[in-house]
Image (cartoon, rainbow, N blue to C red):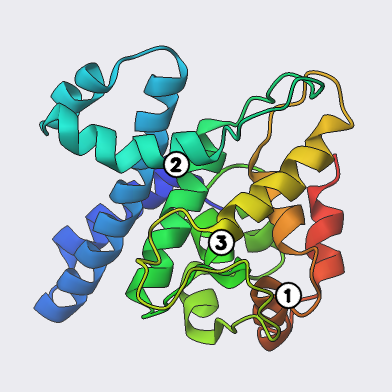
Amino acid sequence: MTDLPDRLTELLEHAVRASDPEVALHALTALRRELDAFERVQAWRALDAGSSYGAVARALGISRQAAHRRYRDLAEATEPPLGADEPPRLHVTPEARAAVQLAGEEATALGAVSMGSEHLLLGILRAGDAVGAEALRRSGVSLEAARRYAQPTLAHNGNHAEAGERASAVTDYARQVFGEALRHAASEPDHAVGVDDLLLAALHDAEGGACRTLEALGVSADLVRARLKP
């Protein structure tokens, strides 16, 4: 499986060398999606390393307010308030933050009024980390196929957005998934919440959209979980 730099190079070459303009346009569209996901991960890495929103904004050529809107809401959602007796916050990796943000965009693009684990599956694939996304790809799950066969959660339990709320907003569901991932990560000292933790949380509910999407693709959720183990 090619890594992200190879994938970006491959798409660019495909677009430049295509003799059919429609093929070139399709390749450019795919390249834009990949570059957008790559940009999100790099921006989160910069913020995680201590860069200011102003510095990230200057690097991206956008206003500080735009950078703040794009990243601050999710940062707050992944850092829930703690009670006096609760342990210190666990660190959330830039890739995990980007995956959830991209999941919200996937939900919006698919016309969903709320973000489900099926969209988190897509966000993880777009974020393209070397553990969670790679486990899905090695199991035969591609972004294009997952989009085509995405299945919604069967039972809604009130943890999704209200009708009319932007799916790209950080929903109660996103917080629930992060909570599940945090609980899993808390069992290991000094463990950062990564995309693999998010994927395990997304696959926790057998009737959830992530598991149902894998089933529609003929992929076992147990196989994906097994590929996440070191």
Q: Could you tell me the amino acid type at mark 3? A: Leu
Q: CA distance from mark 1 to mark 2?
A: 24 Å
Q: Position of residue 87 (x, y in %)?
A: 79, 21
Determine which residue is flagged by label 3: 120
Determine which residue is flagged by label 2: 74
In this rendering, the answer to whether 11 lies above or below 118 is above
Determine which residue is flagged by label 1: 211
At label 2, counting other C-alpha atoms closer than 10 Å, the crowd grade (few under 14, some 14-19, many 20 or more) is: some
Q: Position of residue 200 (x, y in %)?
A: 76, 54
Q: Could you tell me the amino acid type at mark 1? A: Cys
Visible residue check, residue 39: no
Q: CA distance from mark 3 to mark 1?
A: 11 Å
Image quadrant occupied by the C terminus: top right
Left of 74 or right of it: where is 201?
A: right
Residue, x 74% and y 55% (percent of image)? Answer: 201
* Tag 3–tag 1 contact (CB < 8 Å): no
Which callout, 1 or 2, points at the residue further toward the start of the chain? 2
Q: Quadrant of residue 111?
A: bottom left
* Tag 1–tag 2 contact (CB < 8 Å): no
Q: Position of residue 215 (x, y in %)?
A: 73, 83
User: Element under label 3?
Assistant: helix
Left of 155 or right of it: where is 34?
A: left
Q: Could you tell me the amino acid type at mark 2? A: Leu
Which callout, 3 or 1, points at the residue further toward the start of the chain? 3
Image quadrant occupied by the N terminus: bottom right
